[in-house]
Amino acid sequence: MFGATLLFEAINYGVFLCLDCLYREPDFLFKYHHFEWVGVLPGPGLELVFVAMGVAALGVMLGYFYRLSALVLVISFAYLFFLDQALYLNHFYLVLLFATILVFLPANRLWSIDARRRPALRSETVPAWSRWWLVLQLEIVLLYAGLVKLTPDWLQLEPMRLWMNSQSQQAAPVFQWLTQDWGIAVASYGAIALHLLGAPLLLFKRTRLLVFCVYAVFHLTNSLVFNIGIFPWVTIAATLVLFDPGWPRQFLAFLQARGRALRWSHLAEPPCLPAQTDTGKTATRFIVLTVIGVWLCVQIAVPLRHYFRPGNVAWNEDGHRFSWRMKLRSKRGTTQFYVKFDDGSFIDIDSSEHLTRKQEKKMSCIPDLIWQYAQFIEDEYRRSPTDDPAVHVISRCSLNTREAVPLVSELVDLTSISRAEPTSNWVLPNTKSMPHRIF
């Protein structure tokens, strides 16, 4: 299911989206810190990356040259992920994590072409760590998706109210209740309960199926109401890993017993070799568990980093990414950059000459992107090698229906700031309250 989803994504992006518009036409692409070196490949290189991603996803789906396919999939997807920070989405990050984990899992031992080609590979079992690595990674994501919503804005129904009110005319009749305050409250508080209570209950057999059905309805509703790509499908597919490892066979047997399926017995043929024990591999087991333990500790720690930095993370974005802070803020703003030269003269910058409309919109309320663009402007408009122009920005941003206020002081020369410096040191605070409160 993961391979099929990524195959769809490769076709959707590589064939139906304008790659020139996304990557080649802008003069500047925003970069993740320490990944500034990632650039657009020349010629048809970008298209070839999507081809490689699609072929690798198909290999993962079918279990054909699985290890190589999984490795190519994670490399190609990682390359596309790091191309432009302005295109960051939580589900892209989630896919990257799952793809990386799958490189190390023996996911091709049974129903795969590899197992057909190499009978010695076939086995009825896989090491328990391979399942629990995926399970615990998913649990971390689901729990944080609930914890991060325990914020004053979300508990006051923002920005959910803003989004649903804007869709009240387009919403299907079955979803009209979501445009009313009571429905928005049910959805907002229900999302917290589903993640904080539902995620642990998925670990127990008695409650697993019921909670999975609720999660499936939740994700399908999100998919229909919001444009969130493959995230619901990846999450639903991953949640199936929490069921008993033999559930596919049990499900097929259930269908066979009721005469609603074709013969599926060939999927288990030829007979598998007896399960191998790990006797004598204590050191290997210790290394594997240590690596997984470090991975999970990092996944737990990274979303907490904003607690160690001053300011409101929803405003200054200092620790927002990679933290599963999904659907927590709606920002709308404007920016006007200008360059001040050593002789006192200055010029205004028309950002539309360098960026796409989507990049401009994304940048307007994210300090790190504003900083990156300022460095590009400095290099672009430097009159001589010895010239040291200053770049300033007039910015205003609205957070979750609040009145728009300045984001960065116009007096700050953005070129004098290090990227490693916390944004709270040069971003102005937002002291405005939301105009609509439920209590």
Image (tube, rainbow, N blue to C red):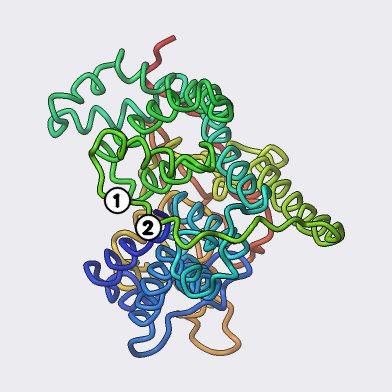
Residue receiving disc 1: 263
Between 269 and 375, which is closer to the camera in this rendering?
Answer: 269
Disc count in the image?
Answer: 2
Between 173 and 154, which is closer to the camera in this rendering?
Answer: 173
| Residue 266 percent location from the top left of the image | 37, 58
364 over 260 or under it: above or below: below
SS of the residue under disc 1? loop
Task: Verify CB contact (< 8 Å) between mark 1 and mark 2.
Answer: yes
User: What is the crowding at mark 2: few (fewer than 14 residues within 10 Å), some, or many (at least 20)?
Assistant: few
* Relative horizontal placement of residue 122, taking residue 279 as reference (left or right): left
* Relative horizontal placement of residue 328, taking residue 223 as reference (left or right): right
| Residue 268 percent location from the top left of the image | 45, 55
Residue receiving disc 2: 266
Which residue does the image show at 40% across and 57% down from the upper left? 267
| Residue 205 percent location from the top left of the image | 54, 26
**Three-letter code, disc 1:** Arg
User: What is the crowding at mark 1: few (fewer than 14 residues within 10 Å), some, or many (at least 20)?
Assistant: few
Between 137 and 25, which is closer to the camera in this rendering?
Answer: 137
Kindly report the distance in space between the C-alpha atoms of the residues bearing marks 1 and 2.
Answer: 7 Å
- In the rendered image, is residue 370 in sight? no
SS of the residue under disc 2? helix
| Residue 421 percent location from the top left of the image | 68, 56
286 over 35 or under it: above or below: above
The quarter of the image holding the C terminus is top left
Task: Write down the quadrant of residue 143 in the picture.
Answer: top right
**Three-letter code, disc 2:** His
Residue projecting furthest to the front: 271
Which residue does the image show at 50% across and 82% down from the upper left? 382
* Relative horizontal placement of residue 427, taking residue 233 as reference (left or right): right
